[in-house]
Amino acid sequence: MKPTSRAFKSNASRALRDEPLKSALSGIKHGFVANRARARANLPEFEDLRDEARAVKEHALAHLDLYLEAYEKKVQETGGQVHWAASAEDARAAILKICRDAGAKTVTKGKSMVGEEIAINAYLENAGITPVETDLGEYLIQLRHEPPSHIIAPAIHLTKDQVEADFRKAHTDLPSARTLEEPEQLVAEARAILREKFLAADVGITGANLLIAETGTSVIVTNEGNGDLTQCLPRVHIVITSIEKVVPTLEDADTILRVLARSATGQEFSTYTTLTTGPKREGDPDGPDEYHVVLLDNGRSEMLGGVFRDMLRCIRCGACMNHCPVYGAVGGHAYGWVYPGPMGAVLTPSLIGVEEAGHLPNASTFCGRCEAVCPMRIPLPKMMRHWREREFENGDTPTLYKLGLKLWAFAARRPAIYHRLTGIVSPLLSRLGRKGRFSSMPLAGGWTRYRDLPAPQGKTFQQRWRERDGQ
């Protein structure tokens, strides 16, 4: 996927005019957000688990080299192979070689954000190999030739009517009179199509939510079972994941899994939590003959020693974007690359550069909800501020923004002028606002074009404080 993060403002403006997108995103609040709140309330030790999960990841990152070596050794002992990939190019080349050695014509894929990061589908297609996404959401966006708009719900931007239209357009060999009005009917149709793909695949590719160093095990969580079919039916199974996913023990993995599903979808556990250790052994009823793990770095080692290290604790639950007012207004495609929302605003500049993705850390209200709900307690607003500082140091801050800061700084360093100006402007804006809000306002059209701007209540805090002291 070619990044378009540089065009975030135009992407967001287009998204705000997209009525079907608004309709699709409206369900987040009553779905993911409400479900997480219930799951948290039903688990008294949830906050303690967050602390434990954070400690697990911190320990693993502090000793990442040791645990990665231990993981590789265990994978080899169980008959698998580990392929180290410093870059996306290295990862793609390793996967293509495995597929060619297996004589693969068709590859089934489970949902993998790292797969999206390295753009493996397009790479395989250009090499004459057909990749088939088997997660329902990923299958839908593959039909539409779109990237995912959410890291756990890739087709959250689509309405049921759009899905029906896409199915009728793509599945031309099925009866045109069939009924596709209910979600169950859409799922049944996708299942019927994908079953044939599962059976025909030569290679299966999955991601990994976690890697366990003590056993050489990869862990995936799904709600559809497509991950199991993807890794068990083909002769060759490839795991594509990134180096920070490793944890020391099975118990550590269990701690993280207890906060993962609750934070992501509000479930106690995902429907399928699958642990895979090596290829099929003698006597096993199913499983692959070959098991490969492609471990991607792609800039993560550089993050380890810097101010963005905390981002490597991310477990890709999506809670930050579910609760983000900016994501909820514009969706994931506006962010212009693989990782959207608050986590993307921090991770994307780390992976593709602040020059390309400098707009993303500015796409935040700094309300702090992302950090409040993050199961790994990642200080996302703090790291977005770091990116803003770097953008400013590089001289990439827009001229109008810099002018505004200079004017504010001029007044802020002169308290008498500052208090006099705010004492005049705040009551004036309060009177001009209709019912306490502005539907239009000079220099604020980017906001009021799509939503009202709250007006000041009247007197400033300083004025109210002086009045209280005078009483």
Image (spheres, helix red, strand yellow):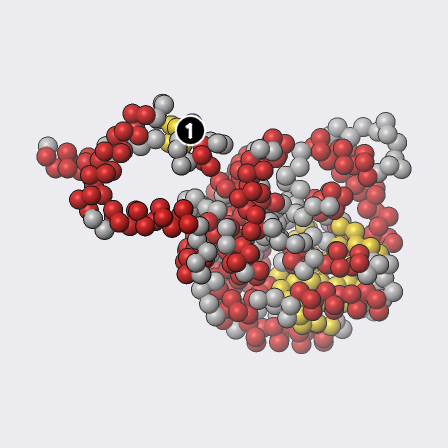
Residue at 54% x, 54% y: name it: 357
Looking at the picture, does residue 90 appear above or below residue 424? Answer: below
Image coordinates of residue 58 in percent, x first then y, are 49, 65
- Reading the image, the residue beneath label 1 is 440
Residue at 59% x, 63% y: name it: 245
Looking at the picture, does residue 295 appear above or below residue 24? Answer: below
User: For the view shown, which residue lies furthest in the left direction?
Assistant: 470
Image coordinates of residue 355 in percent, x first then y, are 52, 58
User: Quadrant location of residue 274?
Assistant: bottom right
Looking at the picture, does residue 328 appear above or below residue 339? Answer: above
Q: Nearer the viewer, residue 229 or 436?
A: 436
Residue at 87% x, 65% y: name it: 103
Image coordinates of residue 320 in percent, x first then y, are 51, 48
Kind of element beneath mark 1: loop
Q: Nearer the viewer, residue 84 or 63?
A: 84
Assign the C terminus to one quadrant of the image: top left
Tell me the kind of residue under disc 1: Ser
Residue at 51% x, 58% y: name it: 354
Q: Is residue 438 left or right of residue 23?
A: left
User: Quadrant location of residue 243?
Assistant: bottom right
Image coordinates of residue 40 in percent, x first then y, are 49, 45
Q: Residues within 10 Å of mark 1 (few under 14, many from 20)?
A: some
- Examine the rendering and report whether any part of residue 68 can be seen: yes
- Examine the rendering and report whether any part of residue 46 can be seen: no
Q: Nearer the viewer, residue 254 or 366?
A: 366
User: For the view shown, which residue lies furthest in the top direction?
Assistant: 435
Q: How many marks?
A: 1
Q: Nearer the viewer, residue 135 or 99?
A: 99
Q: Is residue 449 left or right of residue 470?
A: right
Assign the N terminus to one quadrant of the image: bottom right
